[in-house]
Image (cartoon, rainbow, N blue to C red):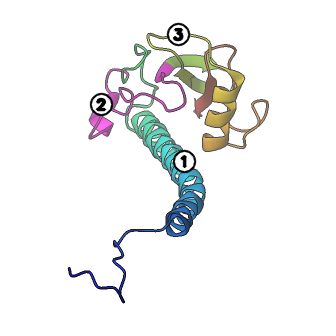
Amino acid sequence: MKWSSRHSYRASAFTLVELIAVIVVLAILAAVAVPRYFDYRDRAERSQLRQRTAVIVNALFSYCRDNQTMPINGNIGMAPAGLMNYFQVDPFVAQLPQGGGWYDWDGPNLGSTGVTGVLKTIHGNPPPLPASEAQKLWLDAALDDGVLATGQWLNHGQGGIFRTVVMTP
């Protein structure tokens, strides 16, 4: 580039005002995008939990219909014997969101209303460890009404929440 007395040389660079404007725009985009990312992630976890739980409950009802009884107790994080025929992928082995944990099946129990079993969420790695109230409320809100004392899913002490499954005679 030639220097002349009439034209001054100007290097091409961003001015401080332009840089601040870009930083402000990026900060606004980040302020909008980050909360949405966490909201989508939370909704995806809730959806996956509802779907996995529905698969388990439907398999339990199908097992009851086909065998006229409930499956026997299984180990924490493992599907009860005979129930695997109703799954393509075992939903018992996948960890629960919000702090980890697994499903547990207790049954069958003979009661006045018929044969019952209890599907529970058990927290901890390794289980069982106490679940916080926030974890239990999150699970209840994802699966039920968000209140631990009402609905299909109820508080079961420190471990998590439970749902009673009834097979009527």
The residue located at (62%, 30%) in the rendering is: 163
The residue located at (45%, 42%) in the rendering is: 58
Circle 2 Cα neighbour tier, 10 Å, few/some/many (<14 / 14–19 / ≥20): some
Disc number for residue 51 = none
Q: Which residue is mark 1?
A: 38
In the rendered structure, are the residues bearing label 2 and label 3 in contact, judged by CB atoms less than 8 Å apart? Answer: no
Q: 70 or 149, which lies in front?
A: 149
Disc with the residue nearer the chain's start (2 vs 3): 2
Q: Which residue is mark 2?
A: 84
Q: Amino acid at mark 2?
A: Met
Q: Is residue 38 magenta?
A: no
Q: Magenta span: helix, strand or loop, mainly?
A: loop
Q: Point out the stretch of residues depicted in magenta.
A: 80-105
Disc with the residue nearer the chain's start (3 vs 1): 1
Vertical placement of residue 1 versus 13, above or below: below
Q: Secondary structure at mark 2?
A: helix
The residue located at (61%, 43%) in the rendering is: 142
Vertical placement of residue 132 versus 96, above or below: above
Q: Point out residue 68 in the picture as x, y percentages from the top left corner.
A: 44, 31
Disc with the residue nearer the chain's start (2 vs 1): 1
Q: CA distance from mark 2 to mark 3?
A: 23 Å
Q: Point out residue 50 in the picture as x, y percentages from the top left corner.
A: 52, 44
Q: Amino acid at mark 1?
A: Phe
Q: Is residue 46 visible?
A: yes
In the rendered structure, are the residues bearing label 2 and label 1 in contact, judged by CB atoms less than 8 Å apart? Answer: no
Disc number for residue 128 = 3
Vertical placement of residue 54 versus 21, above or below: above
Toward the bottom, the furthest residue is 6
Q: Secondary structure at mark 3?
A: loop
Quarter of the image for residue 78 reads top left
In which quadrant will I find the C terminus? top right
Q: Is residue 91 magenta?
A: yes
